[in-house]
Each structure stands twice: as structure tokens, then as C-alpha cells.
Image (cartoon, rainbow, N blue to C red):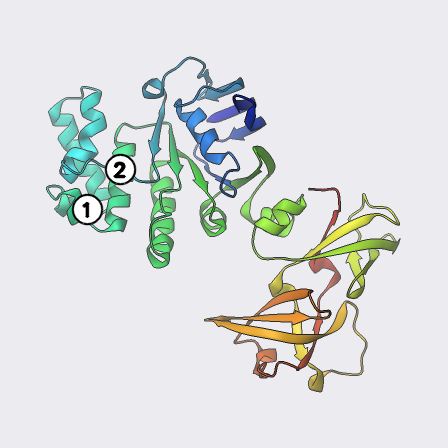
Amino acid sequence: MSVEIKNLTMKFGAFTALTNINLEIKQGEFFSILGPSGCGKTTLLKVLSGFLEQSAGKVIICNKDMCNIEANKRPTSLIFQNLALFPQMSIKENVAFGLRVKKVSNEIIDKKVKELLKMVSLEKYENSMVSELSGGQLQRVAIIRALAVEPKVLLLDEPLSSLDLKLRQHMRKELRDLQHLTGITFIYITHDQGEALSMSNRVAVMSNGKVEQISSPEDLYNNPKTSFVASFVGENNEFDGTILEQTKKTIIVDTLYGKVIVKNRGNLIKGKKVKLFIRPERFSVVSIKTKTNKKRDNSFILDLKTSTFEGSILNIYLKRKKNDLIQTDILIHKKNNEDKFTISKSKLEVFFDDHDVILLGASDE
């Protein structure tokens, strides 16, 4: 293992920021820690980097206990959210800074800096100042400055948060390519689900100082284990329900919208309160005028409230009662999108398959 975190707790006086955190991060893994503001993810990163000392538990990096080992003695590099580049230094000198602190010879520094600048296509900017580069270029400088000292683990604290959408998307690919190229373990802190899902081998979701789930991006999205993960990762429609009956293959749940048939995955009993989650893209939508006489399972007739155009996606908001909404996303190139959803009183039929429903106990918070 590259990094092991065992029973880690972090307290600030009476406030507990981290509670019994346990993580195992593999060598060469791109591992993201995802969560909302205030969940403890940056505190965890500061403990890993040595800027904070945990109240209890262990941090082990490359099979060595980091207890009492200062930040500058750990086999890690940290990229701050604000990048922390030195504006009075050239790009070359920024990249060389860590090597000079380690008293590496000028000959080796020059060679190393040239290699790193070439790796991110910035070799012609080596004598430029920080103020002369774009946001994306500065991100690359910060990354290679951190890589210059050859850390075993690179810690990244939301480094893309200040960039515009297009540049963030471009930098995601660059970061992933760099990680593949170097083979270094990346631990990436973010509140952006798109970043975590698109770049990571695995993702840990945090809430209120605790780890809710650790999974691959695909498993996290398709098989959330708690209501928080289901509602936080990606868009979801949430329904309260009660189990009416079950067979070996299916469970029937009573909801405000009617009976819902769900694939039986076990561990739930008749009469139990549950929460159902259905992804917006899992719905099919047809207008009433195209409705067939055939009765579908998991089908509801709902009123259109509004719709919003979002490029390749049309967000359609439907309601059954005054304050209840189902949100469904429809790709505009889909055949059923030939209908015009512009009349506020228009009625639509929505339906979905039993395996598209995520079913969790109401107590799985």
C-alpha cells in the first residue's frame, strides 16, 4: 500500500472534524476524496501532509509510520488550492525551488527542470514570470513544481476550482495523463463530482467527518450505499416509500406516486420504511397523445411544470401534487424528444425499469 490511514480522529477542542477514518490507497492509484464544504476532506489532507497532527490513529506512507515526522520530511508534495507560486520568480525558478531547498546541484536542477517543462509543453516559457501565464499554464507549473522533488504521493487540494468550465475539463485529462506517465500516487480533494468520477480509480465520499463509501466511480454512481451518497453523487430523484410485499425477484413499494416494483436485492422486510432513488436519465417520457393502451409497470401520469434547455440535455420538471417534483433529463436526440414540451398544462407519462431503482432503508443516512 502507498498510504494507510488507520482509525484516524482529528479534534479541535470539543469539535470533532474527523471520526475514525480508515483508508487504504494503492501504489500508483488516482484516489479522490469527494464531499461538500465542511465535511473534513481538507483537514484530512493536512493531516496526511503533516501540517496537522491527528488526535488519534495512524498515517502510514510507504510502510512507514508518519508519527512525529514533519511535513518537509514526508515523501509527499502538496498542491494548494491557490497554487502558491512565487510571483517574483520566473517559471524556471518556481519549478526549481524545491530542488534548491534540498541542495541539489545546479546541473541536475537544470536538467530536471527542462525535462518537466517539456513534459507539460511549457519549455518556451521557462524565463516567463507568473503574471505572464494563463490559468491553465499556471496549474501545470504548480504540478511539475510538486513533482520535481519526486514525491511518492502527490496531494492535491481542489487545484482546479478557480478555472472556468472548459479549462477545468481540459486539465482533468492533463492531470490524468500526468498521473499515468509518472506512476505516482495521487490523492485528490474535491467537491466536484465530475472531477472525482472522471479522473479517479476509486473515490471516497465524506460527510460530517466520516467516510460514507469507497468505490470505483461506476459503482459509486450506480450502487450508492447510503442516502447521502445517492443524493450527493450525481442528480437523483428521491421518494419515500413503504414495502408492501416481496417475492424472490421483486419488491413492491408504496409511494406518493403509486406502487413501484423494484428488483429484490435482499435485506429489507415488509412494512419497512425505505427511500427510493431514480436517476433522471433512467426515465422514459412520452406525451399522453402517444400513450398506448398497454399498461406498463412503474408508470405514472404527471403534469409538466417546466423544462430547461441545456445543450445536449433537456431537463424536464414534472409534478403530481403541488410541492412534489420528479426531475428527468432527456437527451434531445432521443426519438421521444420529438414531442414539444412547451405547454404548462401538458400531461406526460413517465416510466422506468425495476432495475433502475436504487432502494435503501430509510435509516441508511
Q: Is residue 184 left or right of residue 218?
A: left
Residue 346 position in % (x across, y down): 66, 82
Name the amino acid, label 1.
Leu
On the image, numbered disc 1 is attached to which residue? 122
Residue at x-position 52% and y-position 41%: 202
Name the amino acid, label 2.
Ile
Q: Is residue 157 placed above or below 250 in the rendered structure?
A: above
Q: Is residue 184 visible?
A: no
Q: Is residue 251 placed above or below 182 in the rendered structure?
A: below
Residue 319 position in % (x across, y down): 68, 70
Residue at x-position 52% and y-position 72%: 308
SS type, badge 1: loop
Q: Is the residue marked by circle 2 packed among few (<14), some (14-19), or many (20+) residues within 10 Å?
A: many
Residue at x-position 46% and y-position 50%: 198
Q: Nearer the viewer, residue 65 or 40?
A: 40
Q: Is residue 243 visible?
A: yes
Residue 50 position in % (x across, y down): 40, 22
Q: Which mark is residue 144?
A: 2
Q: Is residue 177 placed above or below 278 in the rendered structure?
A: above
Measured in 3D between alpha carbons, the distance from the residue under mark 1 to the one under mark 2, in whole angstroms, is: 10 Å
Q: Is residue 275 left or right of residue 78?
A: right
| Contact between labelled residues 2 and 1, with CB atoms less than 8 Å apart | yes
